[in-house]
Structure formats: C-alpha cells, structure tokens
C-alpha cells in the first residue's frame, strides 16, 4: 500500500519529563511530518500537540507506538487513504 495521510494527537501530561523524548521521536520521524501545532492547556496542566503526517502504515504505526510508550504521554492517530 502507498502512503497515507493522517493526524496524530499527542497529550503530554508530564511536560518536564516527557517533552525531551517526544521531541526526539518527532525529529526521528521528521520526514513523515507535514505540519505541527502545539498548544498549552494551562487550566488542565496539559500540553496538546497535533501533527499532520504522510507515510506508510508501518512508519506511522511506529511513530504512534513510540509516542505511546513515553511515560506521561498519550497519543492517538487517524489515518486516511488519499
């Protein structure tokens, strides 16, 4: 199957501990990232990141899986076939 387009939503609950690893993972998968927006949600002490991605199912699954393994981070992805 070819490349898919999607969105990965990332919620960071422990900013100090998790952000360095999250940024490391996003850099590792930089070739799949089209755009990124990050928003601090101060009222709930969370940071929310949305990334728009394009890649193979394996690439995007690896990205989402690595993010989900970081303590204090939750992620969900939505992939579409263009």
Image (cartoon, rainbow, N blue to C red):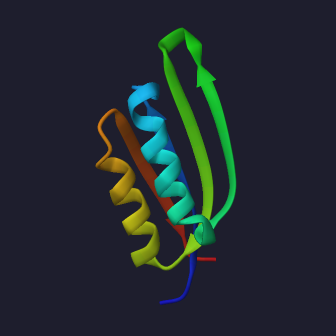
Front-most of 57 and 59?
Answer: 59
Q: Nearer the viewer, residue 57 or 70?
A: 70
Q: Pinpoint residue 27: horizontal percent, then vertical percent.
A: 56, 59
In the image, residue 31 sits, relative to residue 13, either above or below, namely below
Q: Residue at x 67, y 49 (%)?
A: 36
Residue 23 position, x and y percent, is: 53, 48
Lateral position of residue 46 relative to residue 67, left or right? right
Q: Nearer the viewer, residue 44 or 28?
A: 28
Q: Is residue 29 above or below residue 52?
A: below
Q: Position of residue 9 (x, y in %)?
A: 51, 45
In the orientation shown, which residue stands out farthest toward the bottom?
Answer: 1
Q: What residue sits 37% from the left and 40% below the top?
A: 74
Q: Quadrant of the C terminus?
A: bottom right
At x 39% / y 77%, what residue is drawn?
58
Residue at image location 49% in from the left, 13% down from the top: 44
Q: Nearer the viewer, residue 80 or 44?
A: 44
């Amino acid at each position: 199957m070819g490349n898919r387009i999607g969105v990965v939503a990332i919620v960071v609950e422990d900013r100090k501990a998790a952000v360095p690893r999250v940024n490391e993972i996003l850099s590792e998968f930089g070739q799949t990232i089209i755009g990124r927006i990050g928003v601090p949600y101060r009222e709930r002490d969370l940071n929310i990141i949305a990334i728009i991605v394009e890649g193979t199912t394996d690439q995007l699954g690896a990205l989402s899986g690595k993010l989900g393994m970081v303590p204090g981070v939750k992620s969900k992805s939505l992939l579409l076939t263009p």
